[in-house]
Amino acid sequence: MKPAIHLQSTGEPEVPVRAAGLTTCQAPWIEQARARGELYIEQPYELYSEENHRAWRSLFQRMGPRWERYANSHFLAGVRALCLNPEQVPRLNDVNRFLSPLTGFRARAVSGYVPAFVFFDCLRNREFPTTITVRPPAQLDYLPEPDIFHDIAGHVPMHTDPQFAATLARFGAGAHTAAERAGNARDVHRLTSIIRAMARFFWFTIEFGLMREGDGLRAYGSGLLSSFGELEHALVSPAVQRYPIQIEWAINQSFAIDRYQPLLFIVDSFDHLFRLVGELEAWMRQGKLDHVAPGEPAIGEADLDSFVRKTEVHAGPALTNP
């Protein structure tokens, strides 16, 4: 990925042109951090441009009425608890000041993609890898990459709820169970299948889940709660199939990230979701995730390597293909 603007060339170490801001896919400062191999970073708040703040403001203001109509009550309470400023991009330190005392979670800035094991282990440790860039003004409706609005306004309000936070941490702990099985099996196919199953479960619950509330349905999935168009579409469109969640269905169901989701799953409560995560881990130990249906999401080398490195600590040489 190349920066959209040129870096200054003066014979000194390159620095980003200040006017660039921190726009997704157009932020040289982020590109440089990745090039240096820095996954965890500090939020350089002074680099946000006025355009970045306007994008946040537009996103937040127009989502408000849709949240009130379609978001679950736990999310709405979380937005209030975080005291998010609708006028400007939040400082993660301010977010964590309100978040951490409630559930022990904190948002932690990252420079880009987080490999699967590292991401899941962060959840186990009640850290949420958080993108700090802001989507471009021309792509407010949809952006394939995560941005700070998706992560902070979509995900983090749910992290203020103790029961949901415990569920997320329990799900993250499943990565260690997966690493244990990989160490015993030493089988790339099996590890790929387990990671795919976990990713699908996360997608259909944490990212795009629906919950029963009162006499209807509300969204708790962050992919829905950060999308102006899809949030309403998910709850009212006749084109969407909505079914009570079944683990065996969710872990064998592929998905596409570049369109509105045609299939969504419903949980009864966060207590229900917590039990499902426990059942998912039990299935993992029983080998029921070893051969899920092929298809999306693709599991890349970085994801496999993140588990292999964890496994090597206990199992010696790296995994081999059967």
Image (cartoon, rainbow, N blue to C red):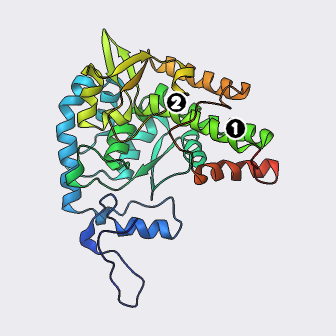
Instruction: Tell me if residue 195 can be seen.
Output: yes
Residue at the right extreme, as displayed: 316
Residue at the image position 64 percent from the left and 41 percent from the top:
192
Q: Nearer the viewer, residue 186 or 59?
A: 186
Spot occupied by residue 222 in the image (x, y as percentages of width and height): 37, 35
Closer to the observer: label 1 or label 2? 1
> Which kind of residue does numbered mark 2 sit on?
Phe
Q: Is residue 155 left or right of residue 304?
A: left
Residue at the top extreme, as displayed: 215
Spot occupied by residue 228 in the image (x, y as percentages of width and height): 23, 36
Disc 1: which residue: 190
> Which kind of residue does numbered mark 1 sit on?
Arg
Instruction: Tell me if residue 86 can be seen.
Output: no
Q: Indicate the quadrant containing the N terminus: top left, top right, bottom left or bottom right.
A: bottom left
User: Badges 1 and 2: C-beta atoms under 8 Å apart?
Assistant: no
Q: Is residue 188 above or below residue 174?
A: below
Q: Is residue 56 left or right of residue 9?
A: left
Residue at the image position 42 percent from the left and 29 percent from the top:
161
Q: Nearer the viewer, residue 254 or 265?
A: 254
Residue at the image position 34 percent from the left and 65 percent from the top:
27
Of mark 1 and mark 2, the one earlier in the sequence is 1
Q: Which mark is residue 201?
A: 2
Q: Which mark is residue 5?
A: none
Helix, strand or loop under label 1: helix
Q: Is residue 85 above or below residue 12?
A: above
Report crowding for label 2: few under 14, some 14 to 19, many 20 or more residues within 10 A (C-alpha). Answer: many
